[in-house]
Image (cartoon, rainbow, N blue to C red):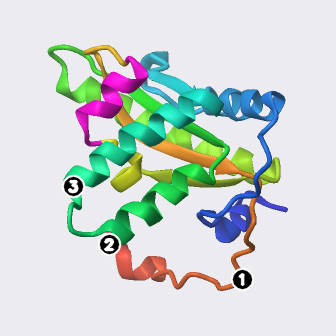
Amino acid sequence: MTVIEKLQQRRAIRQYEQKPVEREKIEQLLQAATYAPNDRMREPWHFYVLQDDSLKRYEEMANAYLQERFPTKPHLVASSLEVIQTTPLVIAVTADKVVGDEGATKDNEFAVCSAIMSMWLAAEELGLGFVWRTRGVGLVHDERMHQFIGATEEQQVIGTLFIGYPAETPTTEKKRSHFNEKTTWL
């Protein structure tokens, strides 16, 4: 299968089998991320792997966050927590900040986004489902996640990756705009 075909078939998988992801496959995902392009070879990423006990602690933190954010929506809180409870592997990914250089910090964010996409494509090849979360249970924009993983002041959380063996097979193709609708030829 070509890269373009893989990109066309890529889908966010949100339902997983209750089966742990083997360490060898996790390491392959992490290795794939390191091949991402990055300005001046800064390799600005760091990966925090959550499984088992750390995943249970993450669920507790997410519960507190969701209870505060949605106090009148217990159904939303419960369904959001179920996402964590049924995901066997979560990886939080940070990008390094470059103090005094906003441009380099942005370049690092872009590199980490590229690393995450590399992981996503590798996950597909390894038979794993993958979804990149930022809002809600992703907790990317909440200081609690930063503290939970022990990130330094020079790191910012870019994404929380939920990974496992798919318990669903997306059958519908997502409608995408034709590139001409989003392109200006100069």
Would you say residue 146 sits in the magenta stretch? yes
Q: Image quadrant for the C terminus?
A: bottom left
Magenta part of the chain? 141-150
Which element is circle 1 on?
Answer: loop
- Please, is residue 166 above or below residue 26 in the view? below
Q: Toward the viewer: 92 or 77?
A: 77
Residue 56: % across, % down: 54, 36
Q: Answer with left or right where residue 90 lies relative to residue 62.
A: right
Residue 132 pos. (x, y %): 50, 51
Would residue 79 be found to the left or right of residue 12 on screen? left
Q: Determine whether the residue tagged by mark 3 lies in a helix, strand or loop.
A: helix
Q: Quadrant of the N terminus?
A: bottom right
**Residue type at tag 2:** Thr
Q: Residue at x 53, y 59 (%)?
A: 82
Residue 156 visible in the snapshot:
no
On the image, which quarter does residue 150 sit in? Answer: top left
Q: Earlier in the sequence, mark 1 or mark 2?
A: 1
> For residue 71, which quarter of the picture?
bottom left
Residue 88 is marked as: none
Q: Mark 1 against mark 2, which lies toward the viewer? A: 1
Question: In this image, 122 relative to 138: left or right?
Answer: right
Write down the residue under mark 3: 69
Of marks 3 and 2, the one in the foreground: 3
Label 3 is placed on what type of residue? Arg
Q: Secondary structure at mark 2?
A: loop
Quickly name the residue at label 2: 184
User: Chief secondary structure of the magenta span?
Assistant: helix
Residue on which the image places disc 1? 171
